[in-house]
Amino acid sequence: MSVVVAKQLVKTYVAGDIKVEAIRGVDFSIEPASFVSFIGPSGSGKTTLLNMIGCLDPPTSGQLQVAGQDITSLSRQEAARFRGEHIGFVFQDFNLIPVLTVFENVEYPLQMVQSWPNEKRKKRVLEMLDAVGMADQAHKYPSQISGGQKQRVAVARALVTNAKLVLADEPTANLDKETANRIIDLMKQMRDEFKTTFVFSTHDPRIVDNVEITFALEDGTLHRLEKSAGGDHA
Amino acid sequence: MRNIFKLAARNLFRYKRRTLLTSMLITLGVVSVLLFISVSGSFKALMVGQITDSMLGHVQIHKQGYLASVDSLPLNRNLTGKQIDKVVQVLAEEDAVEAYSMRIKLGAMFSNFIETTNIRLNAVTPVDEIKTAPLLTERILEGEKEGLLKPGEILIPELIAKGMKVKVGDGIVLVANNKDGSVNGQNFMVRGILEGISGPGGRDGMVHIEDAKTLLRIGAAEVSEVAIRLKDIDQLPAVFASLQEKLGSMKNQQGQPIFEVHTWESISPFFNIAKMIDLMTFFIKIMLVAIVLVSIMNVMIMAVYERINEIGTISAIGTLPNKILGLFVVEGFLMGVLGTAVGTAISLISIAIMNATQISFDFGRQTGLLLSPAIGVADVVLVVVIVIAIAVVASLQPAWKAAKMDPITALKHV
């Protein structure tokens, strides 16, 4: 069963008398454990699409199912609960909580969102930190680690709840080439290990080269790009 | 909940200077209020003690209409025979009554054989009067204090002693009109000089009740007022209500009330000063509320504004709005607790220091009054609860704003 299914998805923003159709009736589906990217120029609607999949922004019309559930009409509270249970987020600016240590940042969703028991929670956090190679930095604060390390922690935080889907908005935009490659490798490794679906919104060709499916967005319409024999999308 | 407290505490610690300044402001407010309550309360208790223990007693009983015409000291409004018996019977039933004194209040002409002046007098039974007004003997500036006075002796107010140049041991004459208008005179020896105090009866002289009866040619039992001292002044409302019920409801043959019962509060003008002190305390508490409200709200609005992106992050990863609300409310709560705890500690230490240094003050004609500030647990608890509750209330609006924040807008905030 597809992790994400969208049918005739529309998102229209209204500012005064002006209506802007950010997404114009798109259809797509994303399969479990896939590595998918949405690409397109600024303003093409890729972040809007990611926000809709992430239950952060409800569609204006159409159907959108995530993890088997229709999310088009969830209340604010229900949406928050759904995000906490099924979706992980990785942000461009890492968005770690500065007053929490690396360990506590990864622990946060299990403690403040899902209420896992103490022992089980700590074990899971250590597993995730180990998986992203940050176990030895567990007691450091975000201000004491590098950008690449922060993004590793963010990946661990996104995966710690066993999320079926991780949404990553420009995850490598603030990283140097080498670190970005390591983060992409890490996410791929995590996908293989935990069978998690990764969906990216990106401009980064390094990500596009590594994903299996790429959707190109332009003026609110979506086209699936097929991968050529050499691995490039066409 | 523990995690919310942990996170809130860390966020407060993150902005150390701002948290410290806000908490200091709350501390300052708490210290001001607690010190004002303790000092003004001490002053009030001291003055009330002075007034009730050296003259008025806690409760007074008169014949109906006596107090309204007390300026003329009317002898035709004295309690007589059966009325006095009834009062004695009712007072015997009241466990809270420590002592009572029956007084005849009269006006007379005071002569030192050279000059004559008016004098107001309280005629008392010394043993009962000392029990009812235990600080009375402290008011005797010159002369023997022990036993107060004997028949044939008079205690004269210091103003008359100075004005008439009368000393202890001098002979004087009192001339008074009795109820029928006939005049009688009697010789007295000055036993002592009485210090004047604020309030009704504070500048009256004093004679033995048997002398007053002779002077006024009163044959049967007759008194102008019954002053009552209670074992504990806190029992005043209950005793007053009981006496009102038992005596205030009694009617004469014409259907008019026989007795009037008054607490010291309705007799002494100091009660109005005491009320003003209470009013000032109330306004100082209002100022404290304003300080806490403004400072906490200001800090919490800043905290929310500075952490918009962070709010967006925790909201996006699934933190429920009520937890975000709780997080900011707990920050305000903790700041209130911190400021209150430090403020209470400083206040209690300051009160202890003031008591150790024995601060004295003058009030009116009374000098060298010793200030003994004290604060009740109830007052401390009330201030603590008010401050913490206001801190929480002040955090609610910013916290609500944070909880309701759209995660997309918040995440875009730079």
Image (tube, rainbow, N blue to C red):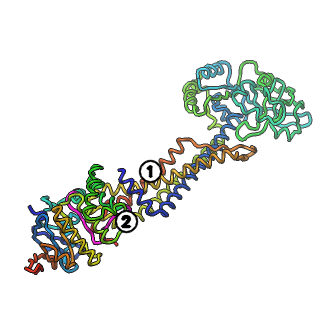
Q: Image quadrant of residue B315? A: bottom left
Q: Can residue B208 be seen in this view?
A: yes
What kind of residue is marked 1? Ala
Q: Give the range drawn in magenta.
A: A85-100
Q: Is residue A25 magenta?
A: no
Mark 2, other Cα within 10 Å: few <14 / some 14–19 / many ≥20: some
Q: Considering only vertical position in the picture, is B70 above or below B408?
A: above
Q: Where is residue B144 in the image (x, y as percent from the top left)?
A: 83, 30
What kind of residue is marked 2? Arg
User: The residue marked by circle 1 belongs to what chain?
Assistant: B
Q: Can residue B409 be seen in this view?
A: no
Q: Position of residue B349 (x, y in %)?
A: 60, 48
Q: How far is the residue under mark 1 from the one under mark 2?
A: 24 Å
Disc number for residue B307: 2
Q: Nearer the viewer, residue B108 or A132?
A: A132
Q: Quick one: SS at disc 1?
A: helix
Rendered-image quadrant of the C terminus of chain B: bottom left
Q: Which residue is drawn at 72% across and 47% down?
A: B361
Disc number for residue B261: none
Left or right of A181 in this view: B163: right
Q: Is residue A92 magenta?
A: yes
Left or right of B122 in this view: A135: left
Q: Which mark's residue is nearer the viewer, 1 or 2?
A: 2
Q: Furthest-right residue in view?
A: B114
Same subunit, labels 1 and 2: the answer reads yes
Q: Residue at x 85, y 26 (%)?
A: B186
**Residue behind mark 1:** B389
Q: Considering only vertical position in the picture, is A130 above or below B345?
A: below
Circle nearer the N terminus (1, 2): 2
